[in-house]
């Protein structure tokens, strides 16, 4: 089973449940928050 097959299965499953897409959006939001926090720390205090 290749990666493409796995992706297809995941996409099909997410289409049925909608849980994966919600989790993915949440994960993306967390990632963006972490990146923003890191950049703020690099810039110094956010004044």
Image (cartoon, rainbow, N blue to C red):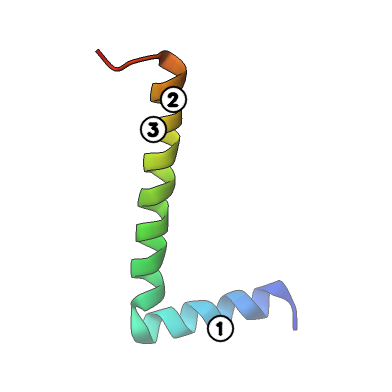
Where does the image place residue 20, in percent across and percent down from the top left? 41, 73
Residue drawn where x is 35% and y is 50% of the image? 29
Compared to residue 47, the image places residue 38 above or below, namely: below
Q: Which residue is nearer to you in this view: 45 or 19? A: 45
Where does the image place residue 44, in percent across and percent down from the top left? 39, 14
Sequence-first tag of 1 and 2: 1
Query: Farthest left residue?
Result: 47
Residue drawn where x is 44% and y is 46% of the image? 31
Q: What is the secondary structure assignment of the residue under circle 2?
A: helix
Circle number at residue 39: 2
Q: In the image, which is nearer the foreground, mark 1 or mark 3? A: 3
For the N terminus, give its image quadrant: bottom right
Sequence-first tag of 1 and 3: 1
Residue that label 3 marks: 36
Residue that label 1 marks: 9
**Residues at marks 3 and 2, CA–CA distance in whole angstroms:** 5 Å
Q: What is the secondary structure assignment of the residue under circle 3?
A: helix
**Residues at marks 1 and 2, CA–CA distance in whole angstroms:** 36 Å
């Amino acid at each position: 089973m290749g990666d493409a097959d796995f992706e297809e299965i995941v996409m099909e499953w997410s289409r049925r449940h909608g849980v994966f897409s919600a989790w993915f959006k949440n994960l993306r939001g967390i990632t963006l928050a972490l990146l923003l926090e890191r950049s703020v720390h690099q810039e110094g205090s956010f004044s």
